[in-house]
Image (tube, rainbow, N blue to C red):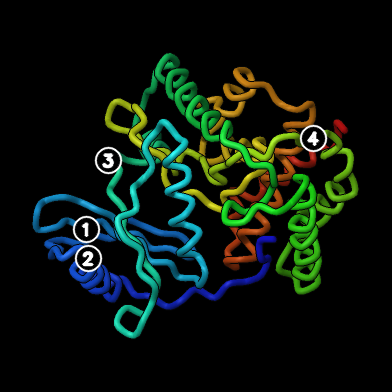
Amino acid sequence: MIQVERIQPIPLEEEEAVEYAKQAVSEQMELNATKVKYLGGGSFGMAFGVELENKSQIVVKFLRANDMLEKEVFDLKLLGEYCPIKFPKVLFARKADEIIPIDCYAMDKIDGKSAFISSLKKLFISKRKKRIFADNVVSALHEVHAHTSDKFGDTLCPNCDTWLDYYKPFAQAIMDKAEQMYQTHEISEKIITTMRSAWSKFDKIFSEEVTEACLIHGDLNLANIMVDNNFEISGFIDPLNSAYADREYDLFQFDNLMGKRFALRKTYINKYGASKNCHSKCAFYGLWNEVYCYIKSGILVNIVMNPLVKNMKKLLAKL
């Protein structure tokens, strides 16, 4: 089961990371870095664009939490094998030591910008272009989902006979931690009340058996879809908690970060079908995932959390 606990990020200053990136590239690729630029990051990762002396460009990512390296590298390779859209190719992986005291890996650079940033900057995207974009995204993701396992669970070691054998203990751990955080005033009454109501209807929401353990990306929203200047897809990036899972666990992210503007989930369902409780499941998955991220990072993003709570309440009223 995925660990549900607060993680203290390993300290890493941007200036330190720039020097570590140069050192790692020189050591692992026997090439000098001529330019290093911070690209961005989240609670537990920092990515840097590196230009090499041969003019090629790569990305070096530092992992500010322990035990992330093996899985991130494994999942990038696995998803890249089954997805018709490009994933970054891993060039090297390096464990922390006394020279560079933080795990890192390098990958080739996917050209373009995230679809989220690109869509913010474009004043107009035609309906036709949105339909083509959505169809290409969901078609590629469905090819990933077509790769299955006879067991559910983490990609590194799937070992559960059913989806709920894997997911329900994880969801229970999030619920238990949320109750603790409510007692210490870290979670609001609005959030915990909605979670309690959803948890009381867990068996109804998840009444349909998930029959296939499908490979999932785990975090495919607009921020992790790269596009060129014509808004054509150039690659997928940054899988998170990839697993052999309910394929609908990949669909709740489609509504995040303006995904509704492109009707990504609707396009997937219209093309490939869904369970009768798909929307309720996605509401549950989305809310529990955001609470999980808050538990891990200690950062509450209300502009993300509040719509998830509202959507869960709306769908609970229909059950």
Report the residue that reaches farthest toward the front.
Answer: 150
* Distance of label 2 from label 4 (alpha carbons): 50 Å
Badge 2: residue crowd in 10 Å (few <14, some 14–19, many ≥20) = many
Q: Nearer the viewer, mark 2 or mark 1?
A: 2
Is label 2 in a helix, a strand or a loop? helix
Q: Which residue is mark 1?
A: 50
What kind of element bears circle 1?
strand
Location of the C terminus by quadrant is top right
Picture layout, residue 206 above or below residue 13: above
Say which element carries label 4: helix
In this view, the mark in front (2 or 3): 2
Residue 222 percent location from the top left of the image: 47, 38
Residue at x-position 27% and y-position 30% = 229
Q: The residue under label 2 is which amino acid type? A: Val
Contact between labelled residues 1 and 3, with CB atoms less than 8 Å apart: no
Front-most of 84 and 18?
84
- Disc 2 or 3, which lies upstream in sequence? 2
Front residue of this view, candidates 188 and 56:
56
- Residue that numbered label 4 is attached to: 315
Q: Amino acid at mark 4?
A: Leu
Q: Amino acid at mark 3?
A: Asp
The x and y percentages for residue 84 are 41, 31
The residue at which mark 2 appears reads as 25
